[in-house]
Image: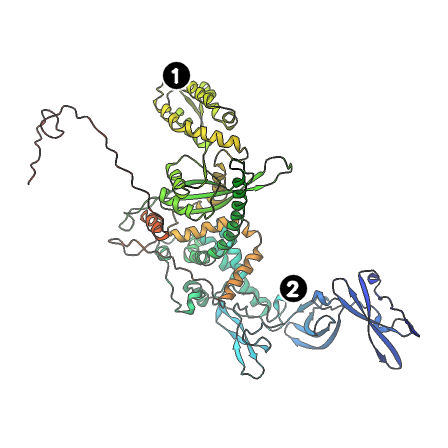
Amino acid sequence: MESGSTFTLPKCPNRNHNSGSYSIVRHGSYWSGQDKHLRFLCRSSDGTIHSFSVMTDGKPSRDARVKNQVIKCPNPKHRGSKVISRGTRASKSGTWTRLSCESVNDEPHYFRVLVSADGAANISLTKPPTCLEHPKAKIVRNGKKGLGGTRRQSYLCSPIGGAPHRFSPPLSREAVAPMASCSGCDELLSPHRGSLTASRHTPWTLAAVVQALNNLSLGLSYAAVSRELRAQRSSALEHLRVEHGVELTSGSSEESSARSGRGARSARDDGASNDSADEQSAAGATSSSSLIRQEGRNAWHLAADLVEEYSPLLFGAVIEKVIARERKSRATNDAILLENPDASLLAPIVYLLDDVPIYIKQWKSARSRHQQDSWSLLVVVELIWQGGKDPLGLPRREARLRLARAYPRANEEAWMLVLDELPVTPDFIIADAGIAIKNAVDRRYAGQRVTFIPSLFHIQRNIRKALEKLPNASSKSGKRVYLAKALYEAVSFMSREELLHSSQEQLAQDWDVLVAVVVSMGSKATDLEKLRAFNEPKMLDAISILSKNPHLPASNAAVEAQIRLSLEPFLENRQARFRNLARTNYLLDLAVARSQGSFSDLNKLGKMIRHSNEAANGWAPTPRQITDRQPVGAGANTPIYSSLLNAQIISRLSQARGIKPAAAKPPSFTSKKIKNPGVGSGRPKGSKNKPKQVTP
């Protein structure tokens, strides 16, 4: 190794390290008895370092032998570091070995290992949390705080030159017995690694809250999710009691913290909360023999509170990315249209609109006599464009929920509220020929370049329904209605393939043929002529647009598909249960977030909730702030949520957002001919009714 002025670097004893990815550096020497040892460092390309030593004559020393250590440092960056035993300690769970890792990369640190009878090693990293006021102070466990299901670990901070004080991190963890372990928990059972709570003074863990929100986004009911929360909590308490000897009794403290909303951010001020009127109504309902139904009535508010707390957070993060994507597309499309106003956009911003009436049944009473018996679901679907395999071909489209709102009615004002939540101007809007949607689109995007495409599917369906009502025009087989052969062939021109190859003259001829067929069957064509006058101009507009943009859909069928797949689970067997407008819309926001891919990574959602609550010192957002208890009519003993069934709320929301009401339409004066005019105003001739005397 050493001879005169020459020095040869040895090879690493690990044969896998004898390559160009590893470098050898001399790192001093030491004496062992009368023998001198030379120490070297083997550094890999990823920064990992380990040491070995050789004798002065080049022979490896005993320290250079590569040993297969049974216990290694759990930190992957300390691969190959030296691990030294620092004694043992006995506990109820067994004998723990305390070890130190002397890493070349970082400072030495300690960890514990429990070796079971079968030789399995359970490693525990017992690093306590850091005090926010004294980051470099010594932290040790200092008892527990809280009662029942909210029992949490507390710590003592001993700063240098300061007075010790007790503290707990913003999001505390469940209290775990010292050095407890089991085959299913391992690392998570260290005293500082209990299950992380979602917020202060709440019995639910962060993982349980994320799973509950995921279930709610799938359409599960409040009662089912709440019962699952309680079942998970009971299972966790039983696990701690049986496996680790930790008694955390679930009872009044859990229910009071979950009901009163003590984990809310407003608790920093007064801690007040508003009890749900729906909850009171459910509690006073007639008891059922079904235990599951009774449990749902007593627990539904737990999941409803989670919707109010975390739906705005998740939906806000999703919509922020969606709006950024839309604005980027808007800038790109504007640049293309500025250069060529007649250009065909390959990735236009397209919204598909539709509404669904939701009919409910309710008993008329003093509280509900002035309410509606229905409400409406207004849905917006966007198209996401993706390039196909053929670069010269048309792009592929993907439909996603963009917005879903529940309002008492689907009138023009309600659609104005929906369009007001879409800040980016679209290129195309596809909807049926409803007057409310068309008027709202014209008002919202007046003076802007937005093209409205009427749904050809709805036009054809309306015409078919009108033809089915004619005598001898259709036959029924089961639930399906079939048009007569002559009529079926006459209306075939309304398909997209036929219309795109039609001109204005050809379309007029096809309508003439359809009218002639109806007349030949002995029916009057008066209603059909009215439909023709109303729909033929719209069909011509759709033909010109779709011919120029063949990649656009000819109908808003994607909206109906999204309603059927994503929103109908929310309405199944409980459409009559929805009363509160704001909470219902928060619940629909979870469905939109799921359609946008927000629930594809639950760990990411958990981190988002954790960072939000930690920024508020551990407090969660305040639930039950959208009570909206009105109206309180005569004889109403208990206020109820009625905004979803009260059409007046639409006007109040429009005023709050600064949306101007629609211009009043001038009254239409119709002249009616009076038959047999008599002496009095409008009295038939010979009538015995005398005109009333008017007192001057």
- Residue 432 in percent (x, y) is at 43, 35
Residue at point 73% right, 75% down? 85
Between 554 and 339, the residue placed more toward the observer is 339
Q: Is residue 104 left or right of residue 382?
A: right
Of the image marks 1 and 2, the number of the one nearer the N terminus = 2
Residue 76 position, x and y percent, is 71, 65
User: What's the amino acid at mark 2?
Assistant: Ser
Q: Name the residue under label 2.
A: 183
Quadrant holding the N terminus: bottom right
Residue lying at 86% horizontally and 73% vertically, measured from the top left: 62
x and y percentages locating residue 501 in the rendered image: 52, 24
Classify mark 1: residues with Cα within 10 Å, few (<14), some (14-19) or many (20+): some
Which residue type does callout 1 highlight? Met
Question: Residue at coordinates 42% horizontally, 22% vertically from top-left?
Answer: 474
Check the image and report above or below for 397 versus 29.
Answer: above
Residue 120 found in image quarter = bottom right
What label sits on residue 365 in the rendered view? none
Mark 1 and mark 2: span between their CA atoms?
81 Å
State the residue in front, 176 or 601: 601
